[in-house]
Image (spheres, helix red, strand yellow):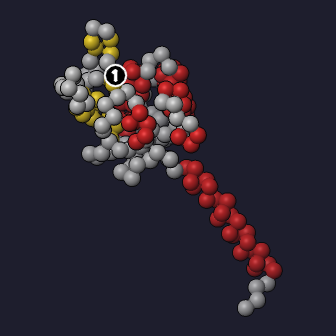
Amino acid sequence: MRISRPRLRAYVATVGLLLAALPIGLAASPSQAASTGSCNTASTRTLGLSAYPHDYGKIPLNGGSWDCWMGNGHGTTAGQKSAVKALQRNILTCYSSTTAAQRIRDSGGDDGLYRSGMVSAMKAFQRYQLGFTGSDVDGVYGVKTRKAMRWAHHSSRGVILVYPTGYLCTNPNRF
């Protein structure tokens, strides 16, 4: 079967468009996204530390899983706002003097919206506080970011605890 030149050009153009669109689709998907989906609420969970057995961390989650992700555009539902706000408050509490915290303050504070200011804050946070490099500096909150973070201690009712030396933030690395 012989293909005419105009039809061949059309096939080549179609394949070219499909191949050109492929990297855009890959770039749009968060590199740290967990299979459990996007964070859609926040809740407290025991930190499991023997020195502080009644302390909790308030951490974003999806359903019952702590392995979730958030990126640009999160905060459109009440549950997503809760998750984003928990992340923002944690950075403002445990990393208050960092570039990331300042970028959160400059872009609306703990407003529960994951917009360009929060993406910029998360990229700075990943690079300078967590030591991530390359594609791990993506501005997306995901499993790797969560596991590397320190989390503020809360009471079982979600109130941030203050100790004589100030806020206590730890990385139990066991969520």
144 horizontally vs 48: left or right: right
Name, please, the residue furthest toward the top. 164
Query: x%, y% of residue 24?
Result: 61, 53
| Residue at x-position 67% and y-position 59% | 20
Q: Is residue 135 visible?
A: yes
Mark 1 Cα-neighbour bin, 10 Å: few <14, some 14–19, many ≥20: some
Query: Between 174 and 1, which is closer to the camera in this rendering?
Result: 174
| Residue at x-position 28% and y-position 20% | 160
Q: Which image quarter holds the N terminus? A: bottom right
Name, please, the residue furthest toward the front. 50
* Dot 1 amino acid type: Cys
Q: Secondary structure at mark 1?
A: strand
Query: x%, y% of residue 122?
Result: 50, 32
Question: On the image, which quarter does residue 161 sit in?
Answer: top left
Q: Which image quarter holds the C terminus? A: top left
Q: Is residue 76 visible?
A: no
Name, please, the residue furthest toward the bottom. 1
| Residue at x-position 38% and y-position 36% | 147
Q: Which residue is mark 1?
A: 169
Question: On the image, which quarter does residue 82 sit in?
Answer: top left
88 horizontally vs 159: left or right: right
| Residue at x-position 75% and y-position 79% | 7
In this picture, is 26 found above or below 64? below
Name, please, the residue furthest toward the right. 5
Query: x%, y% of residue 65?
Result: 30, 45
Query: x%, y% of residue 71?
Result: 48, 41
Query: Between 168 and 73, which is closer to the camera in this rendering?
Result: 168
